[in-house]
Image: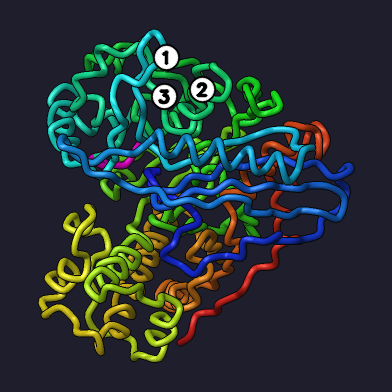
Amino acid sequence: MSGTSAPGSAADPGAAEPGAAAVPGAVRGIRAVAAVAAVDLGATSGRVMIGRVGDDVLELEQVARFPNGPVERADGWHWDVEALWNHVREGLAEALRREPGIESVGIDSWAVDYGLLSRDGGLVAEPFHYRDERTARGVDAVHGIVPFEELYRRNGLQFLPFNTVYQYAADALVAEAETSLLIPDLLAERLTGRRVAERTNASTTGLLDARTRQWDLALAEALGIPPRVLPPLVDPGETIGRARGLSDVPVIAVGSHDTASAIVAVPLSSPDAAYISCGTWGLVGLEVAEPIVTDAARAANFTNEGGVDGRVRFLHNVTGLWLLSETVRAWSERDGAPVDLPALLAAASAEPVPERLFDADDASLAAPGDMPARIAALLGMPEPGPDERAAFARVIVESIANAFARTLRTAGELAGREIDVVHLVGGGALNALLCQATADRSGLPVLAGPVEATALGNVLVQARALGCFGTDASLEDLRVRVASAFPAVRFDPRS
């Protein structure tokens, strides 16, 4: 965040699924093959991957995939974190059965959501889902104490009503908790017993100073958030602890915000390249050395989130494939049978470019529900019948691409860069219609892939920590290996 960052995952069921078998590629100059396990959790699904890195090897093998999503309780939308934990534990056990030589584990997930722990280590309550409506009252409470202008100057975050700081303000149980852990840190604590906050994900809470990258304790106290709930910070590459009951392998901090991991594996081909990490959310932006917290950046609602190796992800959250996946889900429920998404996208590609689009970032599209009806209302048209779905899907894809193009232009203006190429990674890289529409509407070439950028970034940070690339390998070194192993598909803009 959001992802998607806000929440979001680079792989998402809103696009065609990547193969579950090994995804091979070749790289040079690495020691004998090392195997690691990557837990990659998105807002709609999760998986456990085995990553193998070595001389002439950079590959992923999916060993477990499981559903994930909001569950409605009497008091609102939550995450079923116990089910998620069981899936993760079973997936890691399967990974160790297939590859007993696994040397470490890394965990990434969507951002902003958290679990509150008591002193004895139990959950105070089931974690809320970021789309729950309770956060609205948290916004008013926070801004009543610290105006958004000052908040942005301190934390550099775009306004999203579900940022952790607003969730805390709406959550009376924070005052009773001993510690608050973001989702990947919560799972790492269950594996290791250690309570920490990985820095890239901590940057999405609204309580990390954008410049010092330390907790802003004065801000927390001003907002009535007990500083004790903010755990010690760790950086990607640090060992959190050892996985109890899982061969005692080390759990290594990665870019635990899934977008931070995804950007590690974006093979940026130019100093002025932009990226789109596209899954449930589309995270559109640039990698910069220092935060950009100007009034113009605040007005444009751009965020400054932490990246691996101290980089800054200067980006804006655009609603991504969530719009398509929610639309397909609604149609499938009405039909009583699954809608064939690849066939729908193929038919949409044959439809003419629509004259009317909608704002992909409209607030009415944020919550789960009847997405086709909401989009039709924005377009001022009746809901599409079964024979109109391909054209409607084309409108959705083109509207997402239009939002991407608009955000790319703004990013370049705010950062003073002339963007010359766009790297689109994640599940959206499999959606050729979206990639071509983004190229056409931005006027920039789009290089699509790798699809599994988040898992790759997770694996590469672990492998570097294990010494696979030597002691001084930079992000650029890792990206060269990704570019060699996973050649991108190019989409040139059409006149």
Q: Amino acid at mark 1?
A: Gly
> Magenta part of the protein: which range?
157-161
Location of the N terminus (image quadrant): top left
Kind of element beneath mark 1: loop
Amino acid type of the residue that numbered disc 3 sits on in the rendered structure: Leu
Label 3 and label 2: CA atoms lie apart by 9 Å
* Gap between marks 1 and 3 measured at Cα: 11 Å
Q: In percent of the image, x 47 and y 41: which residue is there?
A: 109
Q: Which residue is mark 2?
A: 189
Residue 4 in sight here? no
Q: Which quadrant: the C terminus?
A: bottom left
Q: Residue sitting at 18 percent across and 27 percent down?
A: 170
User: Quadrant location of residue 220?
Assistant: top left
| Residue in the foreground of this view, choosing between 217 and 379 | 379
Picture layout, residue 463 above or below residue 217: below
The residue at the point 76 percent across, 61 percent down is 25
Residue under circle 3?
181
Instruction: Using the image as rendered, state which of residue 201 and residue 406 is in the foreground.
Output: 201
Marks 3 & 2, CB-CB < 8 Å contact: yes
* Residue indicated by mark 1: 121
Q: Is residue 228 above or below residue 23?
A: above
Frontmost of labels 3 and 2 is 2
Q: Secondary structure at mark 3?
A: strand
Q: Is residue 84 magenta?
A: no
Q: Is residue 191 above or below residue 439?
A: above
How far across and how far down the image is residue 263, in percent? Answer: 56, 49
Three-letter amino acid code at the position of disc 2: Glu
Q: Earlier in the sequence, mark 1 or mark 2?
A: 1
Task: Choose mark 1 or mark 3, whichever is in front.
Answer: 1
Is disc 1 in contact with disc 2, using a CB cutoff of under 8 Å? yes
